[in-house]
Amino acid sequence: MSAFLGRYRGQTRVRTESDLRVFLHWCTDQARDPLTIARMDVERYVRWLQDVRRYQPSTVSRRLSVVVGFYRVCVIDAILEHSPTDYVRRPAVPSESLLLGLGHLRFEALIATARLSANPNDFALVALLGLLGLRIFEACGSNIADRHPNYILAAYRAL
């Protein structure tokens, strides 16, 4: 597990570890050893995510990708001869999100509202998310000293 997680850093590692722990807890609940399971067990896990946990196809696909990656490292490191995730069917994920996101007019309204907030951090957060395209965990974990001055200047000029 540590060899697999060692490939990731920061919040990506935290989220990947969380997804892998869900799978390992499922294996424990099913009295299955993760290093001896078969393809049908992985398919049962996928069905559990869909039917019991009622996750969206994109979430199921992401969680399955973590499990596939874990077993890929097990094969690379010669812990397993082959991956039990080979030939597991992934859920169909729509190519386009049903959420359209913010158009430019809605974003302008959002940033104008944030500018009027009594808390200047509201405006800064909206600017970081919308103008620099940061993810929420990147924006919340940012230190202004870590940001390149050209990015900040470009965001300011875009306002």
Image (cartoon, rainbow, N blue to C red):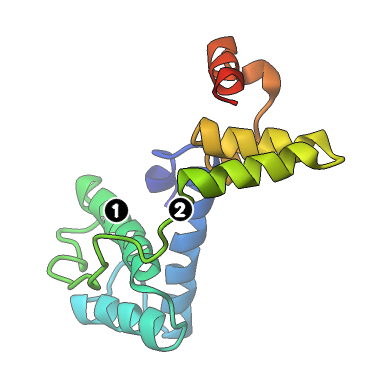
For label 2, the crowd category at 10 Å Cα-Cα, with few meaning under 14, some 14 to 19 and many 20 or more, is many
Q: In this picture, is 121 found above or below 56?
A: above
Residues at badges 1 and 2 in contact (C-beta under 8 Å)? yes
Q: Is residue 154 left or right of residue 39?
A: right
Question: Which amino acid, by three-letter code, is at mark 1?
Answer: Gly
Q: Secondary structure at mark 1?
A: helix
Residue at 43% from the left image edge and 76% from the top image edge: 55
Report the disc number at residue 1: none
Q: Is residue 33 left or right of residue 12?
A: left
Residue at the extreme left = 87
Residue at 45% from the left image edge and 54% from the top image edge: 101
Q: Is residue 58 left or right of residue 119?
A: left
For label 1, the crowd category at 10 Å Cα-Cα, with few meaning under 14, some 14 to 19 and many 20 or more, is some
Image location (x, y in percent) of residue 151: 54, 18
Q: Report which residue position mark 1 lands on.
A: 69
Residue closest to the eye, 75 or 111 = 111
Image location (x, y in percent) of residue 149: 59, 11
Figure quadrant of residue 121: top right
Question: Which amino acid, by three-letter code, is at mark 2?
Answer: Thr
Image location (x, y in percent) of residue 144: 69, 21
Residue at the extreme right = 118
Residue at 80% from the left image edge and 34% from the top image edge: 120
Report the disc number at residue 16: 2
Q: Quadrant of the C terminus?
A: top right
Figure quadrant of residue 139: top right
Residue at 63% from the left image edge and 46% from the top image edge: 110
Residue at the extreme top = 149
Image location (x, y in percent) of residue 77: 25, 45
Q: CA distance from mark 1 to mark 2?
A: 10 Å
Q: Secondary structure at mark 2?
A: helix
Q: In this picture, is 3 found above or below 45?
A: above
